[in-house]
Amino acid sequence: MSKKDTKQKILDAAEVLFAEQGFSETSLRLITSAADVNLASVNYHFGSKKDLIKAVMDRYLAIFMPSTDEALTRLLAEPEITLHQVFDCFVAPLMTLTRIKRRGPEIFLQLLGRGYIDNQGFLRWFIVNHYGEVLEHFTQAIRKAAPELSSADVFWRLHFTLGTVVFTMASSEALRDIARTDFNEEIDVEGLVRKVIPYLASGVGAKPC
């Protein structure tokens, strides 16, 4: 087996386990067993569990973030924007993650949610350090679309937004089955994402208390 194949097997096994069980609950022993490799291989390719987590995330972030930034930059050039338009900027970049795996969008958002649930501070630092400009453009877009929101409002509402999106994508297959069975509605992953956008835009833009 080539070094590239071994590295790919480790990444594939790790991302599934991290998404299902969380970063804290997934041991390197579980990963090596699932990938059918030895611990030395993980140490050789990644060095540590933290570096493996960052590599798993960056496989998605390296595609998602630049595409999102392009969309946000174009939107910020408009004289007036809406929150719906801001969230629309994430749809196409999210769907490009199917190039990595068929369920790439769902897996990515589950991993992102795990980073917060498991209190992985180093992962948040990694994202801010490598993709801070994208996050800043997102914040600028939110403020431009909803200038009445305070910094605290933006923090809480984006936190609730992440929770909503992560739950929705983690339950995507079940939700699509319910839509098909109960409402005779065929919906793909992109359609599901687009369904949640009006809810997110309304929630983030709700009049402050």
Image (cartoon, helix red, strand yellow):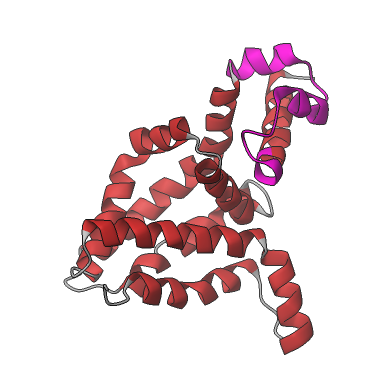
Task: Give the answer, above or below, for where 10 lies relative to 133.
Answer: above
Prevailing secondary structure class for the magenta stretch in the rendered image: helix
> Quick one: which residue is furthest to the bottom in this view?
183
Answer left or right for 201 relative to 136: right
Residue range corresponding to the magenta coloring? 18-47
Q: Nearer the viewer, residue 174 or 150?
A: 150
Q: Residue at x 68, y 34 (%)?
A: 25
Q: Is residue 143 left or right of residue 36?
A: left
Is 152 situated above or below 133?
A: below
Residue 136 against residue 192 in the figure, above or below: above
Report the residue at 78% width, 16% height from top.
38
Q: Do we see residue 184 in this rendering?
A: no
Residue 178 included in the magenta stretch of the image:
no
Left or right: where does residue 160 sit relative to residue 139? right
x and y, in percent, of residue 111 in the image: 58, 45
Q: Residue at x 50, y 38 (%)?
A: 119
In terms of depth relative to the viewer, which is nearer, 67 or 114? 114
Locate residue 66, reporting x and y percent: 39, 47
Q: Quadrant of the N terminus?
A: top right
> Quick one: 48 or 58, which is closer to the camera?
48
Figure quadrant of residue 181: bottom right
The quarter in which the C terminus is drawn is bottom left
Residue 76 lies, in percent from the top left, at 23, 62
